[in-house]
Image: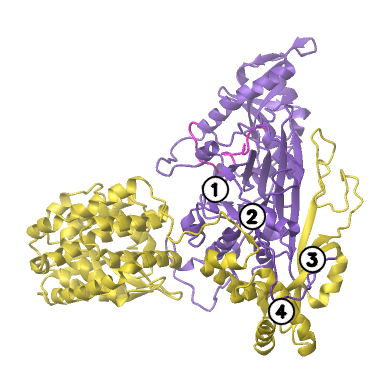
Chain colours: A yellow, B purple
């Protein structure tokens, strides 16, 4: 065994010129840290003869340092090892309370082999010395090299988890239990609210498609099989709770939202459709959380792919529908617009306002959106099934186009590539809440809670629409997480 | 000198220790008071209610102590009488009255002054101390009015705005109340607890404060050594420096690095400056500190029970009482939630096998520091215990939530251990009270500056310091 380690260490330190600390050795070799320290020493000893001058050791010393005791008349009591002395003249006078100023002070110090003897002299009592790390050459004073090792150790610790730790550690905590699933911290009201919403929306398609006269696309989609109609519908509803979930997450709990999503999906007849939506949602959050959410849904991955494919077929059908509807024309137009509209607006705040609007919009716009929603999300889902950790985020944009003589301002959801340099929007952009101006007047009367326009830059033509939009948005501001960003968006 | 150079044998026996299970739990009664329910939170109410509650609760206690002290006393032929309201004090009569201290301090940052001076280009210089003995006025206030206090006795007393005291004296012809004696509420009653010094199996709590993990390349190595020590790996013999005897670690504030200190890191100046955007520029978010802290806490949680308390740079609300840092920010550590990891409020009460502990992230003491002269942190901490209020300057200069019907900072009982984090250096003392109370007061030093942590022995309430040094040479 010892021989193996020696060879291993020789390869690493001498030939590969890479440093190694005892912790890194213990994690890599799955040996106890105490043994690792001894292994390092054994090799160092041997290396002094075998590879003279090529192996440099850094030691760790622990003990009690010698501290100079200044003769200070203000000191209440001086001790060989004072660790704190009252420096303020006011405070050190005799008080009725008892002051205790002796404290044992242990120091751990890392020392390079060259300085070992000198540092040893500074200690009053040395409790231990051992080899902390071995490297090919003396270390720079900021020990950056060791930092690299410890980062590797940290990654191994985090991925290895408790099992690895208990194998190698000297001090184990019997209380520590690592749960594999994310802990759910569910606010009590939320699941109840979530569950009825999707099921309610299931009724909508029949109503919505009946009312809808304006776009042939919708009718064509309605004319399609019940399943696709229902599925996009589920998607539309769930896509709303999904960003809503995220809003809540921003406030409080993220994983509970995902958990709730999980719960609600089970209640809804069509489960599979939810996955791309939720997954899409999760990807916009920081990496770790999205990984977790993805892992939760990972078992449904295979189903997801199949669904996505079938959706792609449906998308093609929809795209081929007559083009006189502005809605279908949208996907083509929007990419042009997206180039003009800055994608640099804050995605988070948009998402904030977006979910807030959702409850209102759900009841109204669900019908119209049904076509677009599946188109949008599905096309992206197969395109990027995995790994959207920090890659893309959903951004809501306001896009205005001319349609049928009316100026239409739509709120469009885009998948935006997020990168360090600049945010570039991707080709796929989808009208998330398409509201063709030519359509129903009755929508304007529905939940316009605050009719005041949030934005002042309205076109007079579409003032109704936009004021409705603004009104709903304002309500979203009031109700949901609220962001001032929407106020500044157009400016 | 014991060194650990040994040959390894094939069947080496190495000692593994299991940490003792700690029963360090939060005290439900206080925890409920300190947590703010986000669903019912409102900021529309006035802060005055907080003062009313404080006065009504503490007045009774002070009155009792004051009447014990002053009943029957007579000065210059006059008997001291208690006066109910501050404005009822009659000129020339020896009387005593209870009220809340309010210090009128011209150097205190004043929003009205800032507004009137906003046309000046000079930015206000932030001072460490706002106390100016020449110009400060100390008044005693209650729901009826304010009374200006004068006299050397009051000027030398360590008091701050917001503490409730009783003063004995007479009103002079100028309308000022000349103070002859002051009485504080004193230490609150303490649940008795026996401290034992015999060492069978010792248990230690590690108090770490101001760790300031930034995750940058230039992060100091001492923080790694600290983690190794807490995991029990740093000592050769795990019993060394009580490594294996630590049962619990409390990170008391500022575990995250100061965000302003991170700005210069990893900045690429060759990039064209971004367009000024309104609102939040998400690409400016630096995930490194939180990712690093997450891995650090996950590592430590594997070996030790950890409590994470927020400080003034941590990602939680700034107003006191700070709410626990949400575990969603720490995805890896979150899996230990409920077993060995916990996020707590600031301030927080713990009960460890009968030892009642009160800890804060240090903002309360740092705020008191501004009001008084000198830098004796221990004295300030003792004073907060004697005032039976751990954050009297809230809500005046210490931002606080406008509580309506309670003041969670009032100390209804006296803890056995009282610590405050992020202090400039380590200090400890024992404060004893009139009724036999005894408190161990600890000022926990900031780790990022001093590289020290404090170990508290649960059974004997003794403290030890563990220091870490890395780097080639030290003076």
Label 1 to label 4: alpha-carbon separation: 40 Å
User: x, y (%) of residue B423?
Assistant: 69, 50
Are dots 4 and 3 on a single chain? yes
Residue that carries the numbered disc 2 in the rendered image: B19
Q: Residues within 10 Å of mark 1 (few under 14, many from 20)?
A: many
Instruction: Chain letter for mark 1, please.
Output: B
Outermost residue, front direction?
B11
User: x, y (%) of residue A455?
Assistant: 30, 56
Quadrant of image for the C terminus of chain A: bottom left
Q: Does the magenta stretch include residue B345?
A: no
Residue that carries the numbered disc 1 in the rendered image: B344
Q: Which of marks 1 and 3 is in front?
A: 3
Residue that carries the numbered disc 4 in the rendered image: A134
User: Range of the magenta residues?
Assistant: B387-405
Q: Residues within 10 Å of mark 2 (few under 14, many from 20)?
A: many
Are dots 1 and 4 on a single chain? no
Q: Are marks 2 and 3 in contact (CB under 8 Å)?
A: no
Label 1 to label 3: alpha-carbon separation: 36 Å
Q: What element carries label 2?
A: loop
Label 1 to label 2: alpha-carbon separation: 22 Å
Q: Which mark is residue A128?
A: 3
């Amino acid at each position: 065994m010892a021989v193996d380690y020696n060879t291993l260490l020789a390869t690493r330190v001498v030939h590969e010129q890479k440093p190694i600390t005892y912790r890194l050795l213990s994690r890599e070799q799955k040996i106890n840290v105490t043994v690792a320290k001894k292994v390092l020493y054994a090799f160092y000893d041997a290396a002094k003869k075998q590879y003279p001058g090529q192996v440099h050791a850094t030691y760790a010393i622990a003990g009690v340092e010698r501290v100079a005791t200044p003769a200070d008349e203000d000191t209440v009591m001086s001790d060989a090892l004072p660790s704190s002395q009252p420096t303020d003249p006011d405070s050190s006078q005799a008080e009725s309370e008892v002051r205790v100023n002796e404290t044992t002070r242990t120091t751990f110090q890392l020392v390079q082999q060259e300085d070992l003897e000198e540092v040893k002299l500074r200690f009053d009592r040395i409790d231990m010395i051992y080899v902390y790390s071995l490297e090919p050459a003396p270390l720079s004073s900021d020990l950056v090299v060791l930092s690299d090792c410890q980062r590797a150790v940290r990654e191994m610790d985090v991925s290895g988890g408790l099992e690895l730790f208990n194998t190698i550690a000297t001090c184990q905590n019997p209380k520590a239990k690592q749960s594999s699933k994310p802990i759910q911290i569910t606010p009590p009201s939320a699941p109840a609210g979530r569950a009825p919403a999707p099921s309610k929306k299931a009724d909508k398609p029949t109503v919505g498609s009946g009312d809808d006269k304006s776009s042939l696309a919708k009718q064509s989609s309605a004319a399609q099989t019940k399943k696709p109609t229902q599925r996009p519908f589920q998607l539309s509803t769930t896509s709303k709770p999904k960003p809503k979930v995220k809003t809540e997450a921003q406030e409080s709990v993220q994983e509970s939202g995902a958990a709730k999503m999980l719960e609600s999906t089970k209640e809804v007849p069509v489960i599979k459709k939810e996955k791309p939506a939720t997954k899409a949602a999760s990807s916009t959050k920081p990496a770790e959380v999205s990984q977790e959410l993805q892992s939760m849904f990972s078992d449904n991955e295979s189903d997801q792919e199949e669904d996505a494919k079938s959706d792609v077929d449906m998308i093609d059908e929809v795209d081929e529908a007559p083009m006189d509807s502005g809605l279908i024309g949208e996907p083509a137009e929007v990419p042009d617009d997206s180039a003009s509209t800055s994608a640099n607006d804050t995605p988070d705040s948009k998402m904030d306002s977006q979910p807030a609007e959702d409850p209102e919009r759900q009841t109204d716009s669900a019908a119209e959106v049904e076509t677009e929603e599946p188109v949008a999300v599905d096309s992206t889902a197969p395109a990027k099934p995995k790994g959207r950790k920090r890659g893309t985020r959903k951004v809501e944009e306001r896009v205005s186009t001319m349609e049928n003589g009316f100026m239409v301002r739509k709120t469009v959801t885009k998948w935006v590539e997020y990168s360090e340099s600049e945010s570039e929007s991707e080709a796929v952009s989808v009208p998330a809440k398409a509201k063709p101006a030519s359509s129903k007047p009755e929508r304007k009367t529905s939940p316009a809670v605050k009719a005041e326009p949030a934005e002042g830059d309205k076109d007079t033509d579409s003032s109704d629409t936009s004021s409705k939009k603004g009104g709903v948005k304002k309500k979203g501001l009031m109700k949901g997480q609220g962001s001032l960003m929407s106020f500044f968006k157009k400016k | 000198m014991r060194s650990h150079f040994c040959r390894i044998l094939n069947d080496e026996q190495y000692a593994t220790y299991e940490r003792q299970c700690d029963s360090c739990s939060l005290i439900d009664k206080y925890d409920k008071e300190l947590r703010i329910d986000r669903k019912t939170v409102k900021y529309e109410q006035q802060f005055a209610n907080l003062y009313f509650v404080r006065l009504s609760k503490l007045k009774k206690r002070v009155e009792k102590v004051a009447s014990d002290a002053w009943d029957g006393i007579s000065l210059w032929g006059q008997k001291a009488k208690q006066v109910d309201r501050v404005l009822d004090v009659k000129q020339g009569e020896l009387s005593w009255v209870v009220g809340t201290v309010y210090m009128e301090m011209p150097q205190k940052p004043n929003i009205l002054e800032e507004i009137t001076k906003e046309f000046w280009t000079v930015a206000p210089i932030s001072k460490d101390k706002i106390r100016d003995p020449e110009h400060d006025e100390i008044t005693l206030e209650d729901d009826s009015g304010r009374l200006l206090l004068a006299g050397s006795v009051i000027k030398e007393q360590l008091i701050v705005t917001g503490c409730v005291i009783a003063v004995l004296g007479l009103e002079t012809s100028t309308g000022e109340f000349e103070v002859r004696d002051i009485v504080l509420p004193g230490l609150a009653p303490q649940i008795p607890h026996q401290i034992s010094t015999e060492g069978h199996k010792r248990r230690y709590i590690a108090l770490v404060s101001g760790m300031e993990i930034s995750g940058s390349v230039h992060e100091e190595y001492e923080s790694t050594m600290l983690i190794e020590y807490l995991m029990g790996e740093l000592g050769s013999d795990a019993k060394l420096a009580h490594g294996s005897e630590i049962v619990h670690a409390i990170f008391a504030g500022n575990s995250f690095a100061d965000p302003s200190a991170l700005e210069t890191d990893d900045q690429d100046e060759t990039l064209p400056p971004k367009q000024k955007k309104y609102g939040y520029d998400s690409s400016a978010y630096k995930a490194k500190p939180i990712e690093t802290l997450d891995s650090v806490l996950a590592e430590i949680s594997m070996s030790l029970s950890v409590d994470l308390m927020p400080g003034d740079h941590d990602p939680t609300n700034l107003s006191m009482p700070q709410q626990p840092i949400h575990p969603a920010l720490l995805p890896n550590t979150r899996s230990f939630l409920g077993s060995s990891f916990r996020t707590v409020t600031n301030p927080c009460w713990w009960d460890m096998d009968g030892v009642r502990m009160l800890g804060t992230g240090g903002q309360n003491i740092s705020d008191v520091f501004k009001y008084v002269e000198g830098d004796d942190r221990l004295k300030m901490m003792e004073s907060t215990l004697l005032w039976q209020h751990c954050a009297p300057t809230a809500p005046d200069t210490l931002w606080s939530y406008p509580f309506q019907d309670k003041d969670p900072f009032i100390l209804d009982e006296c803890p056995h251990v009282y610590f405050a984090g992020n202090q400039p250096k380590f200090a400890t003392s024992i404060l004893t009270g009139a009724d036999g109370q005894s408190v161990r007061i600890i000022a926990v030093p900031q780790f990022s500056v001093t590289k020290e942590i404090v170990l508290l022995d649960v059974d004997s309430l003794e403290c030890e310091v563990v220091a870490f040094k890395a780097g080639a040479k030290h003076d």
